[in-house]
Image (cartoon, rainbow, N blue to C red):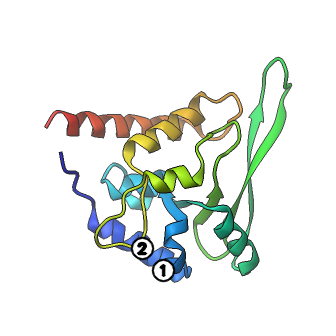
Amino acid sequence: MKITLKSGNVANISRSLDRLGLRESADQLVVIGGAALAVFGIKPLRETDLDIAVTSELMSQLEADGQWELSLRQATMSGVAHEREVVGYNGLTITNGDVTAIKMPLDDLYRVSSAQLIKKSITPDDSAYRFIGPARVLDWKLSLVNSPYYSGPKAKHLEDATRISSFLTKISNT
């Protein structure tokens, strides 16, 4: 079955990335998370931020750019071997907006590389940018929810997982 993308959301996200000067680097990034869900009509765009997975090369360029700042997201590791040890993964957040660049894999949180995500992504006809599909977002969200290392907002990820599951069920039944 052919899935119809929300062209208005694709255009809004593309314009946001263009304003950041990322068009020439479009082959080195992929839109992930809630923004990718918005492209498929699974989640309203106004309810999400814009996360991009980037290659090591692009991450280095962004670090040197001056309009991005380090964003340390933390996860708490608990268990027999790790008594409440805080681990983190670094991303870069644009200083004047709500865009975060993340270099994958995220160690023990999600072991899929940026290159793998880019390779398996979808590029709409009317955009230079790539988007990960709903099944991959579901995989990522469930990995975060089930990870003993992640202490972020699990309820948000479970809600997204439910939305994705409903979407995938709906398109498989048509």
Q: Which residue is mark 2?
A: 14
- Looking at numbered disc 1 in the image, what kind of residue is underneath it? Asp
124, above or below 111, in the image: below
Image quadrant where one finds the C terminus: top left
| Residue 34: image location, x then y, percent | 46, 53
Q: Which mark is residue 81?
A: none
Q: Nearer the viewer, residue 16 or 117?
A: 117
Q: Which residue is mark 1?
A: 18
Image quadrant where one finds the N terminus: top left
Q: Nearer the viewer, residue 80 or 1?
A: 1
For the residues labelled 2 and 1, the Cα–Cα distance comes to: 6 Å
Q: Nearer the viewer, residue 120 or 11?
A: 120
Most distant residue in the left direction: 174
Position of residue 45 in the picture relative to residue 85 (left or right): left
| Residue 12: image location, x then y, percent | 38, 72
- Asked if labels 1 and 2 touch by Cβ distance under 8 angstroms, the answer is yes
Residue plotted at (39% across, 34% down): 162
